[in-house]
Image (cartoon, rainbow, N blue to C red):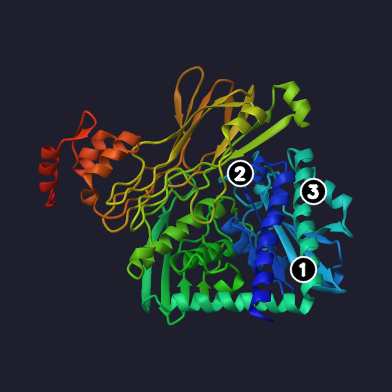
Amino acid sequence: MDKITYEIVRSSLYAIAREMKIAMMRTAASPIIHAGGDASAAIFDADMQLVAQGNDIPTMLGSAVISTKASVEAVGRKRLRPGDVIISNDVYLGGGNHQPDVQFTRPIFYEGAIIAFAMTRGHWSDIGGQTPGSYSPKTWDIFGEGIRIPPVLIFRDDEPVRDVVNLIVQNTRDPASRLLDIKAQYAGTFVGDDRIRALAAKYGKQNIAAAMAESLEHSERLMRAEIAKIPDGVYAAEDYLEPIGESADLLPIKVKVTVQGDRMVFDYTGSAPQVRGGINCPFAVTCNSTWFTVKAITDATIPINQGCYRPVGIIVPEGTVLNCRYPASVVSGNTETSPRVIDLLLKALAPAVPQRVIGQSHCAACPGIFAGNDPDERRSRSLNRKYVTLVDVHAGGLGARPDKDGINAIRVHVGNTGAQSIELIERQFPLRVEEWSIARDTGGAGRWRGGCAAKRVYRVLFDEATCTISGERGRVAPDGAFGGRAGALFDARIERRGGGVETIPSKGDQLVLARDDRVTIQPAGSGGYGDPHERPPERVLADVLDGYISSEAARSLYGVAIANGQIDEATTRRLRAGRGVGG
């Protein structure tokens, strides 16, 4: 087709994916979907290759490259007909992330043939299992993480398969809300089906197929050209994961990256064997981290589709913490281990692309999950539920960049879910948010400062509730780059109403809370970039005035003396001269 028509069709595919997500968010019950945006939508071609996605959750869409094909093949392509929708969340049968992320896959028919597939994926607030919110890193195996749904039809001829729906929602703690989540994800696929068929009616199904194929090849060509700019060589790194249990030994993860021409191969041989506890990664999750990193160090403007991944080879020995075997538990591997892998890859590639890497980041969704019976009967009646579950993700620091400071209070890497607003939490849940602030001195010092973490403090208004926290970097601090200092560690604690403070480890167990207990959750900070004594003193002063660093840190880490809100230039020159840095 001509280039103008091609670009119209290609851009339409991406617009359709974005509209699908909007439709899903507007009708979902889970706050983490409708308010936090923990959902994704995408369009696949007739051969189940990812051709267009919204600005969504990278970890969901990378694994969808594997799970969409697996879902269709499990049900049987020849069995499918218009109005069918497949559901699956099984990380071992469908190649997914973790079981709270549920995928819907819909074949799109036009003139009697499948011309595309529409996919939606959302994080449900509860999928059953051992703990409320289905998010305990201390589960021994996959069975404790919630109901496993193999690829099955949940809609047939645009009508729900009632037995399947009932079986799923009755295995969760809030069936009415899960039913709304099912309808929301179905609505997203319905929008995709309607828009793609309209596009085919206008331009012809042959042109749609041609545009999809050219889009994949276009992204592949651009990606290969970017990889070819990276110096050929072998680059390696090693880091350590935090296991379940404070006394357990740290777990090594290793990578060897081979760059040759326009191709990259990532070999994770030597990483630790899989363990008990939900820090293991399915193969698809390690693929997510790898593909994301390649995109991040090349050109962010390349249209994202499966063509981007073709020049990338991935080797992960089976049975390791980065490619676990059934029935290992995986819930935190998707949200905590996965970004740690990205930091590992950036560490390895720093000598090759120093201007494209950053200091290490907080690397965690850091969900705090509060659940229990709502004592407010009026609210329970109005929202049609008694038992409530809040999955609230928390924002830490993004590592400092080669020419900019890091970013404060943000999700990083493969997860970009937003924190829920205080207004929503206090309106819908028996909790009061007493503080939401930037945590001072959590960003690593450097010529460019690492981003600081955000801290939230909750007061419990349940009569009795449970709380589960899955964090990261409670023992391994986010390191700096090229002389930058490490950021602060994860910190969480409970202040009991009767007195006493309990520290919560990064991979916490399910805890019981009472009314008026206070829970503080603060993710890790992030690493700095470059020598802190090369940071201009006026920037250090601005950080002190903004509350990002203390005057004590300014003096001890940056060599900048501040008194009465001003720089003490004589003392600063003396401090920096002692480090061999001029004034």
The residue where tag 1 is placed is: 199
Badge 3: residue crowd in 10 Å (few <14, some 14–19, many ≥20)? some
- At 45% from the left and 44% from the top, the residue drawn is 396
Helix, strand, or loop for circle 3? Answer: helix
Verify CB contact (< 8 Å) between mark 1 and mark 3. Answer: no
Amino acid on which the number 1 mark rests in the picture? Leu
Which comes sooner in the sequence, label 2 or label 3? 2
Amino acid on which the number 2 mark rests in the picture? Gly
The residue where tag 2 is placed is: 36
Q: Position of residue 63 (x, y in %)?
A: 62, 63
- At 67% from the left and 70% from the top, the residue drawn is 8
Q: Is residue 151 above or below residue 373?
A: below
Q: Position of residue 578 (x, y in %)?
A: 10, 47
Amino acid on which the number 3 mark rests in the picture? Lys
Q: Is residue 38 visible?
A: yes
Instruction: Describe residue 67's horizontal placement relative to residue 565 as left or right.
Output: right
The residue where tag 3 is placed is: 183
**Residue 92, quarter of picture:** bottom right
- How far apart marks 2 and 1 lie (CA) works out to 30 Å
